[in-house]
Amino acid sequence: MLFEAYPARNVIHREIWGREVFLFDASNRPVWQIAPEQGATDDMHRNFDATRPATDTFSAISNIDGRFYASRIGGDTFVIDMTTGAASYSGWART
């Protein structure tokens, strides 16, 4: 589940900012909240920098060949470990 805030409508959830992806079990209990590795890029011409603070929210979840990915609004894409919620940077994609 991707939980979205709407800053334009003054709906902001700072406690989950940048960690808006959740997995719930069949009884609607939370299993994990995404834990993306630190870092960001400006665009496809800048390498991912793990020392930069990440300020973008997640905007999409996709399943490609059985692997789940979460993409930030700025294009940084992470592969999600579906057991733990840990997310590792996998590349930049235009979103």
Image (cartoon, rainbow, N blue to C red):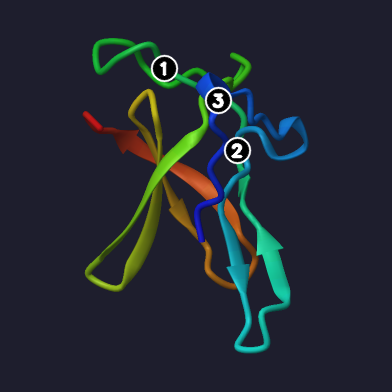
What is the spatial separation of the Cα atoms under label 3 and label 2, in whole angstroms? 29 Å
Q: Position of residue 23 (x, y in %)?
A: 59, 68
Q: Secondary structure at mark 1?
A: loop
**Disc 3 target residue:** 9
Q: Amino acid at mark 2?
A: Glu
Q: How many marks?
A: 3
**Disc 1 target residue:** 41
Q: Secondary structure at mark 3?
A: helix
Indicate left or right for 27 with 59 as reference.
right
Q: Amino acid at mark 1?
A: Thr
Is 17 placed above or below 35 here?
above
Q: Position of residue 13 (x, y in %)?
A: 71, 35
Q: Residue furthest right?
A: 15
Q: Amino acid at mark 3?
A: Arg
**Disc 2 target residue:** 37
* Badge 3 vs badge 2, beta-carbon distance below 8 Å: no
Which quarter of the picture shows residue 50? top right
- Nearest to the eye among marks 1 and 3: give it: 3
* Badge 2 vs badge 1, beta-carbon distance below 8 Å: no
